Image (spheres, grey):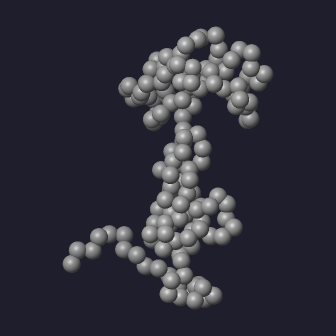
Amino acid sequence: RVQMPPSSTVRKLKMYRVPMNAETIPDADSVTVAASAFVDIESEGGSVVGPIDEGVFEVTVTSVNADFIGAEDLYECETSNGGCGGGDPIQALCDEREGAAPTCTCRADNGYDPVPGVVPVGTECELKPKHYDTHVKDSYFRLTHGDRLDY
């Protein structure tokens, strides 16, 4: 069993094996690690179950002749909408991706398009020019209700 620190809110744990013959063995001071040396234990018949209790995971491996590294994914979309739409969920949707940055999509349903030339796409969105002249858009604003209106 793997016990995470008490303050941890890990929801999913990935375990990797670093073979004993790997050219680059990671250490706490490594900034860049030879990711090709890591082998997902699930690809070799191992498993990670949990959390079975707060911060507790059950890990099964097929071989113990290696070092093991545990990693959790960050849930970027839970903080400032993952940077999508400048952090505004009205402007953009944030889609979590395991082991990678989230995918941002400007919300066309709310009238937003990606700002041209901004990478990654969807991190900045702008209001579509529907009923105004795009050359003087500084004088326009969009007002939307955040609450349901019951009349």
Residue 25 visible:
yes
In this rendered view, identify the residue nearer to me: 43 or 66: 43
x then y, percent, for residue 128: 53, 77
- Residue 70 lies in quadrant: top right
From the viewer's perspective, is 122 left or right of 32? left
Q: Position of residue 94 (x, y in %)?
A: 50, 55
- Picture quadrant of residue 124: bottom right
- The x and y percentages for residue 34 are 74, 30
Residue 137 relative to residue 34: left or right: left
- The reply, left or right, for residue 39 in relation to residue 31 is left
Q: Which residue lies furthest to the left in this view?
A: 151
Image height of 18 relative to 123, above or below: above
x 71%, y 14%: residue: 20
Q: Residue 22's x, y, as percent? A: 74, 20
Instruction: State the residue in front, 151 or 108.
Output: 108
Q: In this view, does 25 lie above or below 103?
A: above
**Quarter of the figure that contains the C terminus:** bottom left
> At 53% from the left edge and 24% from the top edge, which residue is drawn?
42
How many numbered marks appear?
Answer: 0
Above/below status of 84 relative to 12:
below
Quadrant in the picture for residue 121: bottom right
Q: Is residue 69 visible?
A: no
Q: Looking at the image, which residue is at 60% across and 85% down?
A: 134
